[in-house]
Amino acid sequence: MQNRELTYQPSPAFAQLAQEETAIKIWEFLCEGDNIIRAETATFLKKPALEALGPILHSSFDVFNKDLVEKSVFDAHKKLSGNMMRQIMEHLGYVIDKTGVQVVNKTIFKTATRYKKAD
């Protein structure tokens, strides 16, 4: 998927945050081909899509490092990335299978949403 195929449409709760440079870079990161493959592979393995990306997000963006930012900033970007991933997965033909699924590698996320192919 290329960035120009899908434009992030933030919910009102994320409208202001989505305009920040870091949020734009997170969106671009999530839309990268390798990261789409990671998310789809996690989904195929019945894992949350973001589970495969947590360690990479942590090492790539300071906002995902609890030691470098306030908890409110960390939490806001976690929620934002979940909202972004939902739009990406829906664009790829997936629907929500289950929310609040435990994540094995808890670098960033303790729980996340699992998707499945739409029937």
Image (cartoon, rainbow, N blue to C red):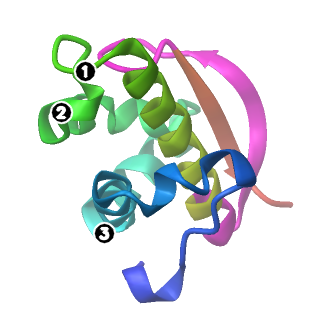
Q: Amino acid at mark 1?
A: Val
Dot 1 crowding, Cα within 10 Å, few <14, some 14–19, many 20+:
few
Q: Nearer the viewer, residue 91 or 3?
A: 3
Q: Are marks 1 and 2 in contact (CB under 8 Å)?
A: yes
Q: Is residue 112 above or below residue 77?
A: above
| The residue positioned farthest toward the right in the image shown | 119
Picture residue at 25% right of the left edge, 21% below the top: 69
Task: Determine if the magenta segment contains residue 92.
Answer: yes
Residue extending furthest toward the front = 16
Separation of marks 1 and 2 at Cα, in angstroms? 7 Å
Give whichever of discs 1 and 2 has the lower sequence position: 2
Is residue 105 in view from this perspective?
no
Foreground mark, 1 or 2?
1
Residue count near mark 2 (Cα–Cα under 10 Å), binned few <14, some 14–19, many ≥20: some
In the visual, does 6 lie left or right of 114? left
Q: Is residue 119 magenta?
A: no
Disc nearest the viewer among 1 and 3: 1
Residue 62, position in %: x, y?
A: 18, 33
Q: Which residues are magenta?
A: 89-110
Q: Earlier in the sequence, mark 1 or mark 3?
A: 3
Looking at this view, is 108 or 33 the one in front?
A: 108
Mark 3 residue element: helix
Query: On screen, 116 above or below 107?
Result: below
In the rendered image, the quadrant that contains the N terminus is bottom left
Classify residue 58 as left or right of residue 70: left
Task: Identify residue type, mark 3.
Answer: Gly
Residue 9 lies in quadrant: bottom right
Residue 109 rendering spot, x and y as whole percentages: 44, 20
Q: Tell me if residue 117 comes above or below residue 101 in the rendering.
A: below
Q: Which residue is mark 3?
A: 33
Q: Secondary structure at mark 1?
A: loop
Q: Quadrant of the C terminus?
A: bottom right
